[in-house]
């Protein structure tokens, strides 16, 4: 917890944050999906799991889910970068609590977007293992957010975060939102 607070005390410039985001995007948007698909395919074969391949429905449902997830995640990153003056990378934490844009719908829109993006890729590929891997890592990330990230946000932003937390759902978005 103290390390998170220490990281959050330093504000980075736009150029430094942009370079860090570019590297993170290459990892999260390109390399991790390739790794998940490769490992899931091998796991499907090893466990002799059938593909749930229905052709066009897989491509449409998986592609649409991945696209929505990618959009929601990138929108979250953009708002955090511009309004929060930070990044999703813990060492370059937001300097200001962000409650606008996708953060009005749920407190963790970036995580939701990533779950949908990777889940959509798993559906698109028709891989039971890929979907299972995404669900497993979703549970791990939720545990991490609850155990560490929320406590760190409470420590840094105090009552402001407490009020936001009470009014905004954790992960499942509220499709309507109140603006005070």
Image: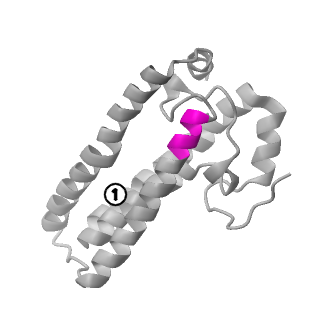
Colour mapping: one colour
Left or right: 180, with 165 as reference point: right
Residue sitting nearer the eye, 145 or 43: 145
Q: Residue furthest right?
A: 180
Identify the image quadrant of residue 115. Answer: bottom left
Boundaries of the magenta span = 76-82
Image point 54% across, 34% down: which residue? Answer: 81
Identify the image quadrant of residue 40. Answer: bottom left
Left or right: 125, with 93 as reference point: left
x, y percent for residue 53: 23, 80
Question: Is disc 1 placed on a helix, strand or loop?
Answer: helix
x, y percent for residue 135: 42, 60
x, y percent for residue 68: 46, 63
Image point 61% across, 23% down: which residue? Answer: 1
- The residue under label 1 is 133
Q: Please, what is the dominant secondary structure of the magenta stretch? A: helix
- The correct choice, above or below, for 1 with respect to 37 in the image is above
Examine the rendering and report whether any part of residue 115 can be seen.
no
x, y percent for residue 137: 41, 51
Q: Is residue 167 magenta?
A: no
Examine the rendering and report whether any part of residue 152 can be seen.
yes
Identify the image quadrant of residue 15. Answer: top left
- The correct choice, above or below, for 65 with respect to 171 in the image is below
């Amino acid at each position: 917890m103290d390390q998170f607070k220490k990281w959050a005390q330093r504000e980075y410039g736009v150029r430094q944050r942009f370079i860090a985001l570019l590297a993170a995007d290459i990892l999260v948007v390109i390399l991790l999906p390739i790794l998940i698909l490769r490992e899931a395919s091998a796991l499907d074969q090893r466990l002799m799991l059938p593909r749930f391949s229905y052709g066009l429905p897989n491509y449409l449902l998986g592609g649409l889910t991945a696209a929505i997830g990618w959009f929601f995640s990138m929108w979250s990153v953009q708002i955090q970068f511009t309004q929060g003056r930070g990044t999703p990378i813990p060492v370059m934490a937001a300097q200001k609590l962000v409650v606008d844009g996708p953060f009005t719908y749920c407190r963790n829109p970036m995580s939701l977007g990533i779950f949908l993006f990777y889940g959509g890729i798993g559906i698109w590929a028709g891989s039971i293992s890929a979907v299972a891997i995404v669900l497993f890592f979703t549970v791990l990330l939720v545990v991490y957010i609850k155990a560490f990230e929320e406590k760190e946000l409470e420590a840094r932003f105090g009552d402001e975060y407490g009020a936001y937390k009470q009014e905004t759902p954790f992960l499942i978005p509220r499709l309507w939102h109140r603006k005070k």
